C-alpha cells in the first residue's frame, strides 16, 4: 500500500493556462481592448487645462453635463490597466497611440507633457497637432524644447502644425503694432519649423494649415478626432 506522501508526489503538476483573451489573434484582441479605453479623442494639452486624474494621461473636465462613457469624474475604465502587465501595455499603446494630442505651444504644452508622462509613455504617442497662436499674439513666445522634439517626432505617424487666427486682436491692434508682432512671430515660427525639420524622418506625415479650432471635431491629415471628453466646452482658450 502506498503511503500518503507517495500518493501526493504522483499528483500531476498543474500547467499554467493562457487566458482566453490571449488565445485569440492579436488583431482581434486589440479591437476588443479598444472598446475599453478612450480613443479617437482630441486631448487638449496646456499648463492650465491638462489635469491628470489618477492614471496618466487621464484628465478631468469636471463637467457633469458631459454624457460620455469615458467621463473622467469616475474613471472606472482605468481598471483594465491593472489586470496584467501585458494588458496594460497593449491598452496604453491604444490610449497614447490612437488619441490626438493637441499641444498649445504658447501655453506650456511641452513642459506639461514632460512633467506629466513617463518617457516610456511619451514614446507611445503617434499623433500630435502643434497649435501656434495668432501672428498677432502679444504674449511671450518661448523657443522650442529641442530635446523634447528630438524624442517625440521620429515616433509619430501624423504630425500637424495649425495656426489659430485671432480676429478680436486684429480688430483692436494698430498696424504698426501688428507689424512688430508679426516679425517676432515669424522668427518664433521659423525656429519651430527648423527644429521639426531636423528630426522629421521618412514615414512621418507632416501637415500645416490655418485652423479656428471650432466645432465638435478636430482634423489632422486624413484623420478626425472628437473634442471630448478631455475638453471643457466652456473654455476654448
Image: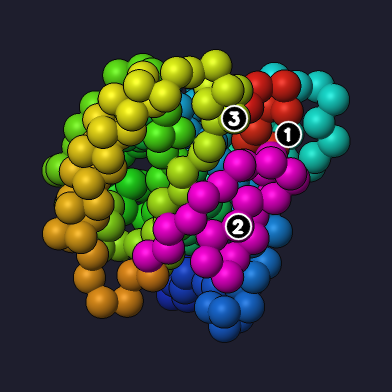
Q: Secondary structure at mark 3?
A: helix
Q: From where the camera sits, is residue 144 visible? A: no
Across and down, in percent, residue 2 comes to 46, 73
Circle 1 crowding by C-alpha within 10 Å: few under 14, some 14–19, many from 20:
many
Across and down, in percent, residue 126 comes to 41, 59
User: Which residue does the image show at 27% across and 40% down from the upper left?
Assistant: 186
Between 217 and 2, which is closer to the camera in this rendering?
217
| Residue 159 higher or lower than 57, as above or below | below
Across and down, in percent, residue 228 comes to 69, 40
User: Which residue does the image show at 58% across and 23% down from the upper left?
Assistant: 171
Query: Which mark is on residue 219?
Result: 2
Tell me the residue that label 3 is attached to: 167
CA gap, disc 2 to disc 1?
22 Å
Q: Secondary structure at mark 2?
A: strand
Q: Are marks 1 and 3 in contact (CB under 8 Å)?
A: no
Query: Which mark is on residue 71?
Result: 1
Q: From where the camera sits, is residue 71 visible? A: yes
The stretch of residues the image draws in magenta is 206-228
Between 223 and 215, which is closer to the camera in this rendering?
215
Q: On the rendered structure, is 194 left or right of 153?
A: left
Q: Quadrant of residue 188?
A: top left
Q: On the rendered structure, is 78 left or right of 156?
A: right
Q: On the rendered structure, is 154 left or right of 1?
A: left
User: Which residue does the image show at 74% across and 45% down from the upper left?
Assistant: 216
Q: Earlier in the sequence, mark 2 or mark 1?
A: 1
Q: So how many labels did they put on this image?
A: 3
Between 33 and 171, which is closer to the camera in this rendering?
171
Is 212 magenta? The answer is: yes
| Residue 55 higher or lower than 38, as above or below | above
Amino acid at each position: 500500500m502506498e503511503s500518503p506522501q507517495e500518493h501526493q508526489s504522483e499528483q500531476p503538476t498543474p500547467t499554467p493556462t493562457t487566458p482566453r483573451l490571449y488565445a485569440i489573434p492579436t488583431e482581434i484582441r486589440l479591437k476588443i481592448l479598444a472598446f475599453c479605453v478612450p480613443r479617437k479623442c482630441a486631448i487638449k494639452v496646456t499648463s492650465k487645462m491638462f489635469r491628470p486624474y489618477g492614471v496618466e494621461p487621464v484628465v478631468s473636465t469636471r463637467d457633469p453635463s458631459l454624457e460620455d462613457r469615458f467621463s473622467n469624474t469616475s474613471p472606472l475604465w482605468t481598471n483594465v490597466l491593472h489586470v496584467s502587465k501585458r494588458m496594460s501595455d497593449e491598452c496604453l499603446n491604444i490610449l497614447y497611440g490612437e488619441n490626438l494630442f493637441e499641444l498649445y505651444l504658447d501655453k506650456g504644452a511641452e513642459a506639461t507633457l514632460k512633467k506629466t508622462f513617463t518617457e516610456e509613455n511619451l514614446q507611445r504617442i503617434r499623433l500630435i497637432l502643434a497649435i501656434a497662436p495668432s501672428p498677432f499674439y502679444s504674449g511671450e513666445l518661448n523657443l522650442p524644447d529641442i530635446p523634447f522634439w528630438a524624442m517625440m517626432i521620429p515616433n509619430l505617424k501624423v504630425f500637424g502644425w495649425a495656426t489659430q487666427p485671432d480676429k478680436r486682436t486684429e480688430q483692436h491692434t494698430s498696424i504698426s503694432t501688428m507689424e512688430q508682432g508679426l516679425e517676432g512671430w515669424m522668427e518664433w515660427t521659423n525656429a519651430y519649423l527648423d527644429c521639426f525639420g531636423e528630426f522629421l524622418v521618412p514615414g512621418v506625415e507632416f501637415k500645416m494649415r490655418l485652423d479656428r479650432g471650432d466645432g465638435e471635431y478636430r482634423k489632422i491629415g486624413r484623420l478626425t478626432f472628437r473634442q471630448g471628453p478631455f475638453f471643457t466646452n466652456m473654455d476654448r482658450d
